[in-house]
Image: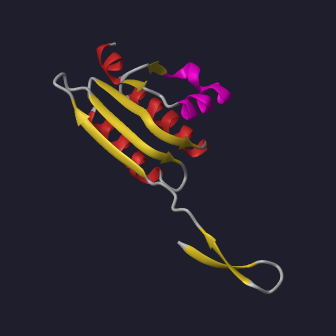
Amino acid sequence: MMMPSDNGRGEATLVTALPRPGLEVRSRATETGAVVCALAGDLDIETLASAAETLTGLVAQRPPALVVDLREVAFCDSSGLNLLLRTRIAAEKEGLHLRLAAVAPTVLRVLELTGARTVFTIHETVEEALSA
C-alpha cells in the first residue's frame, strides 16, 4: 500500500506500508480426543481476537489435553502472552492439561524474559506434547 507523506520540505513522497501479517488459527482433534490449536502469524493486540475466541471455546469443550502449537508464530507481544496465561488458568480451572509445543524462538524469548516459561509445560514438538 502506498501512502502520501510530507518529507518536511513541502514535497509529497510516497511511503510504502508493508501489510502486517494476520494470525491464522487452526484446530484439530486427535484420535484420543486431545485438541491441537495451531497459531501462525503475529500474536498481538491487533490479531488476538480469533485466537482468544478459539482457545476459550476449546477450553469450554474440556478435551483431555489442549496443545497450543506455536511453531509458526512470528511475533508475540504482551497481549499475546496474556492470552496464553489466561488460557492456562482457564484450562487449569477446568482440570485440563494445557501444553505449549514447538514454541518459536521469538515467543520463547518473551516467555523467558517475563518468567512465564516456568508456568507452562513446553514440548519440542506437537507429537511429544500429545504423548506426554
The mark total stands at 0
Q: Image quarter for residue 34?
A: top left
Q: Image quarter for residue 30?
A: top left
Residue 71: x and y in percent read: 43, 33
Residue furthest left as drawn: 31
Q: Quadrant of the C terminus?
A: top left
Q: Is residue 105 above or below residue 119?
A: below
Q: Is residue 114 magenta?
A: yes
Residue 83: x and y in percent read: 50, 41
Which residues are the magenta region?
105-120
Q: Is residue 43 above or below residue 9?
A: above
Please tell me which residue lies in front, 47 or 17: 17
Please tell me which residue lies in front, 79 or 20: 20
Residue 89: x and y in percent read: 47, 30
Q: Residue at x 31, y 43 (%)?
A: 26
Q: Main secondary structure of the magenta part?
A: helix
Q: Is residue 118 magenta?
A: yes
Q: Identify the colour scheme used.
A: secondary structure
Q: Residue at x 29, y 14 (%)?
A: 131
Q: Residue at x 33, y 36 (%)?
A: 37
Q: Is residue 106 left or right of residue 70?
A: right
Q: Image quarter for residue 17?
A: bottom right
Residue 20: x and y in percent read: 52, 58
Q: Is residue 117 left or right of residue 22?
A: right
Residue furthest bottom as drawn: 10
Q: Is residue 76 above or below residue 23?
A: above
Residue furthest top as drawn: 132
